[in-house]
């Protein structure tokens, strides 16, 4: 992986290593993928102020997210089917994040279970919750996250129904994969992935299998979200979950100023400005374009985080400058995982750290905690 210098290189390497249906799952956005593209493109439009002849020694990227120390304000986003990018993917990514000193968030739709990830790590990770119609199952998931000593619950607000991603439908995506000639071909052309996958038992939804009844077709994401996810999720449910969980709570998927105000009133610890990586409402604005408006409206009441479109340390710096206290990467770490397992995730984090550090220095700043709108060129 010596020629891998930026996240784009990891993406190209992952494409060569991961069967098409799973690479595409990570890479897809809803419908036209316009919002997915806007998430990335709008970061590029923001320009930074170049400052000179300032002391650049002793720089620090250390910060906190919801009061928890982080070596840089970049957490790993909850991503579905991570264990299909690489065998035991969630366990490997969680270990890489732990060693790096940044939070790892395990998705409800993960392949490795909460207990698997707890067994692979020594420090607390975060757990992302989808709310199912079966409230006993939700209670049980929250209890399992507590038993695993998860140090934050990330409640996703923007996926009561699944946005349509054309690539997944065309690929016939499922976990575990089906054995049609097309799927066999996609896997057979990725022999290393197959060999590693044959050495693990974890090939289906680890948090669900064996813990719930009445899921007729677990393998198809669209069928089981339609059957199981609660389309009536409301602000009252947020209060119920906050009570049930009793620990640090992060609300993910806020993109509108009015919703941000409602979210701030819940007493949660943070919100994540997010459009689900452009995977839900295609046509919604990019996350970074909404960040300053949301920070202006609620930034003094609640910590504001952001995900969507972050592909470099420069993007992290821009988000922090516009008022985010924390950022999240989804696809960048998945590309690293697909390209090289745990070492690939560490490389993704390393690339971002270096870019963030050099960018901060060239903007004339030494401490990430001092970054504000001042570094943005008008
Ligand atoms: C799940 O969170 C997805 O976006 O596929």
Image: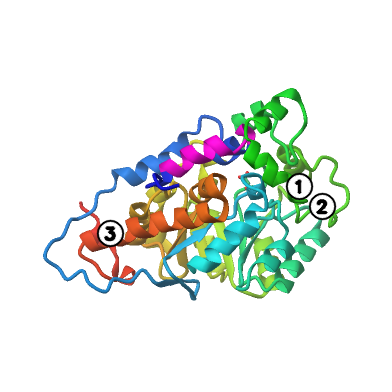
Whether residue 176 appears in this view of the structure is yes
Residue 117, horizontal then vertical, whole percent: 68, 63
How far across and how far down the image is residue 169, in percent? 66, 29
> Which label was assigned to residue 73?
none
Q: Quadrant of residue 324?
A: bottom left
- Residue annotated with mark 1: 204
Residue extent of the magenta highlight: 8-21
- Where disc 2 sits, the SS reads loop
Count of residue discs: 3
**Where does ligand 1 appear, by image quarter?**
top right
Provide the major secondary structure of the magenta segment.
Answer: helix
Label 1 crowd (10 A; few <14 / some 14-19 / many >=20): many
Determine if the C-beta at disc 2 is less than 8 A from ligand 1: no
Q: Which residue corresponds to mark 2?
A: 209
Circle 3/circle 2 CB separation < 8 Å:
no
Q: Position of residue 85 (x, y in %)?
A: 61, 45
Specify which label sits upstream in the sequence, 3 or 2. 2
User: Does mark 3 have its CB less than 8 Å from ligand 1?
Assistant: no
Which residue is farthest top? 181
Q: Can I make out residue 281 in this image?
A: no
Q: Quadrant of residue 140?
A: bottom right
Above or below — where is 223 with respect to 213?
above
Mark nearer the viewer, 3 or 2: 3
- How far from the left and from the top, in percent, is residue 245? 69, 71
Q: What numbered label is drawn on residue 358?
A: 3
Residue 12 included in the magenta stretch of the image = yes
Q: Nearer the viewer, residue 238 or 172?
A: 172
Classify 10 Å Cα crowding around label 2: few (below 14), some (14-19), many (20 and above): few
In which quadrant of the rendered view does residue 359 lie?
A: bottom left
């Amino acid at each position: 992986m010596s020629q891998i210098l930026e996240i784009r290189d990891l993406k190209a390497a992952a494409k060569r290593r991961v069967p098409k249906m799973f690479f595409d799952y990570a890479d897809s956005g809803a419908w036209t993928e316009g919002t997915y593209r806007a998430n990335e493109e709008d970061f590029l439009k923001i320009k930074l102020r170049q400052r000179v002849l300032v002391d650049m020694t002793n720089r620090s990227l250390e910060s906190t997210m919801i009061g928890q120390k982080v070596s840089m304000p970049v957490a790993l986003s909850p991503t579905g089917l991570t264990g299909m990018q690489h065998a035991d993917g969630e366990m490997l990514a969680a270990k890489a994040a732990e060693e790096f000193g940044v939070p790892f968030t395990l998705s409800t739709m993960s392949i490795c279970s909460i207990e698997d990830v707890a067994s692979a790590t020594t420090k607390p990770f975060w757990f992302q919750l989808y709310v199912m119609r079966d409230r006993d199952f939700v209670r049980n998931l929250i209890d399992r996250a507590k038993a695993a000593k998860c140090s934050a619950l990330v409640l996703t607000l923007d996926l009561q129904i699944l946005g349509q991603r054309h690539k997944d439908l065309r690929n016939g995506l499922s976990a575990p994969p089906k054995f049609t000639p097309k799927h066999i071909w996609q896997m057979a052309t990725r022999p290393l992935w197959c060999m590693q996958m044959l050495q693990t038992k974890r090939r289906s939804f680890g948090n669900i299998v064996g813990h719930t009844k009445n899921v007729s077709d677990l393998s198809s994401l669209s069928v089981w979200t339609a059957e199981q996810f609660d389309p009536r999720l409301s602000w009252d449910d947020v209060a119920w979950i906050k009570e049930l969980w009793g620990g640090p709570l992060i609300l993910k998927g806020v993109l509108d100023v009015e919703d941000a105000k409602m979210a701030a009133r819940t007493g949660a610890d943070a919100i994540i400005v997010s459009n689900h990586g452009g995977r839900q409402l295609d046509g919604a604005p990019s996350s970074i374009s909404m960040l300053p408006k949301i920070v202006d409206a609620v930034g003094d009441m609640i910590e504001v985080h952001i995900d969507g479109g972050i592909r470099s340390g420069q993007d992290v710096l821009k988000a922090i400058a516009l008022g985010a206290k924390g950022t999240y990467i989804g696809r960048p770490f998945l590309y690293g995982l697909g390209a090289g397992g745990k070492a690939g995730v560490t490389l993704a984090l390393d690339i971002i750290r270096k870019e963030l550090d050099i960018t901060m220095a060239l903007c004339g700043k030494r401490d990430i905690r001092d970054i504000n709108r001042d570094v943005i060129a008008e």
